[in-house]
Image: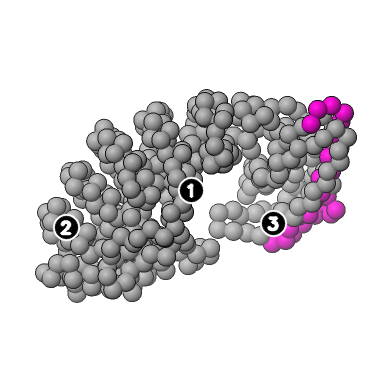
Amino acid sequence: MPLTIPTMATAFKHLIDRDLVHDVGQHLRRAWPAFPQEAFVAQALNGLDALALKARARHIAHALADTLPRDFHAAAEVMEASLRPVPQPRFEHDPDKELGQLGTDATGLGGWALWAFGEYVAHHGLAHPDRALRTLHALTQRFTAEFAIRPFIVAHPERVFATLQQWQHDPSAHVRRLVSEGSRPRLPWGLRLQALVQDPAPTLPLLRTLQDDPSAYVRRSVANHLNDIAKDHPERVVDWLRTHLPEAPASRVQLLRHASRSLIKAGHPGTLQAWGLGEPFHGQATLHLPAPTVRIGEALSFSVSLHAAPGPQQTLELDYRVHHVKANGETSPKTFKGKRLRLSPHEAWHWTKAHSFQPISTRRYHPGHHRLELLLNGQVVACADFDLLA
């Protein structure tokens, strides 16, 4: 999702707050003088403070369903009339900066207020896909419709993909991004598109067009989409690399690099070979821990020393893997990115790193015996053990 969101989990829900509800009511009343603004606000605010972010959007969508016109086409007209004008593009190659600055103002609604609109369209527009898709086309230029379009892909795949084929050439980078982002098989926070998890073929022609889009904003989505596909069909992505990496422009190389990240971290042989990283390291690798213990909330310091053997220059992908202790005492490995480097014969190379064990919203730590592994081109070349303390 392109809009900037707070880093603290406790602040997420405040993106959709009481002021936002009042703004929605005012602009819907402006667009449709018969809109029951007071009833909408009262219903939307009832119980809002106790809800998390996604639940708040759905709660407001329920209030919209009870106060907008019963006819979906009429309701869509009202919603679109309440939107602020589409901004003139100021960030030609990176327009997500534009959406990051786009909120509600005196001219109409924009930003986080429109998540509830997307929820409403996703639930009440399924029987009217053509009209609903036009509304999503409008919403995504002022917020995003990547979540709302997914039920339509499930219910009306042929119709939606015919529309996406048109949208891949849309003048708006926001719409072109939706073509890729909305059809990602495993979009975070979004409905999983199980049919595309099983077979991503319907999206591949779209990605072929969009991988060379002039907007980096669109190309990042394509990279993430291909990375989704790699989780279920790694050989498809390897074939993609073999076809589209040779003689690729720099922008596409960067995209494909990002698309390959999970497979490179996993040491997938075909992917490493496509990037010229298939050879094992020839030389000596040392992993050193200054201290064998670290406390939760602190950082583990370690250093890496490489000494290349005689022979040709080596291209290396250096990653490291931490085997975290889980609550049940078992361990779960997670690979982290390190460096990409080239070593000449006999060359020595050193690197130091501090790996944080500060708890975050997406990862909890448990005391116990951990292992750190050093990987070069996907192969473990050194390891060290340490204890994580409470």
At 76% from the left and 37% from the top, the residue drawn is 342
Q: Nearer the viewer, mark 1 or mark 2?
A: 1
Of labels 2 and 3, earlier in sequence is: 2
Of labels 3 and 1, earlier in sequence is: 1
Q: Nearer the viewer, mark 3 or mark 1?
A: 1
- Give the alpha-carbon distance from disc 1 to disc 2, as whole Å: 32 Å
The kind of secondary structure element at disc 3 is: strand
**In terms of depth relative to the viewer, which is nearer, 358 or 234?**
234
Disc 2 designates what residue?
Answer: 77
The kind of secondary structure element at disc 1 is: helix
Disc 1 designates what residue?
Answer: 216
Which segment did they paint magenta? 289-313
Disc 3 designates what residue?
Answer: 356
Q: Left or right? Give the position of 188 relative to 78.
A: right
Q: Amino acid at mark 1?
A: Ala
Q: Nearer the viewer, mark 2 or mark 3?
A: 2
Measured as percent of width and height from the top left, residue 193 is found at: 37, 38
**Marks 1 and 3: in contact by CB < 8 Å?**
no
Q: Residues within 10 Å of mark 3 (few under 14, many from 20)?
A: some
Residue 293 lies in the magenta stretch:
yes
**In terms of depth relative to the viewer, which is nearer, 264 or 294?**
264
Q: Left or right? Give the position of 20 relative to 72.
A: right
Residue 2 in view: no
Q: Amino acid at mark 2?
A: Glu
At 64% from the left and 47% from the top, the residue drawn is 326
At 86% from the left and 38% from the top, the residue drawn is 347
Measured as percent of width and height from the top left, residue 150 is found at: 33, 43
Q: Amino acid at mark 3?
A: Ser
> Which quarter of the figure is the C terminus placed in?
bottom right
**Is 362 rendered above or below residue 313?**
below
At 79% from the left and 31% from the top, the residue drawn is 313
* Residue 244: mark in rendering: none
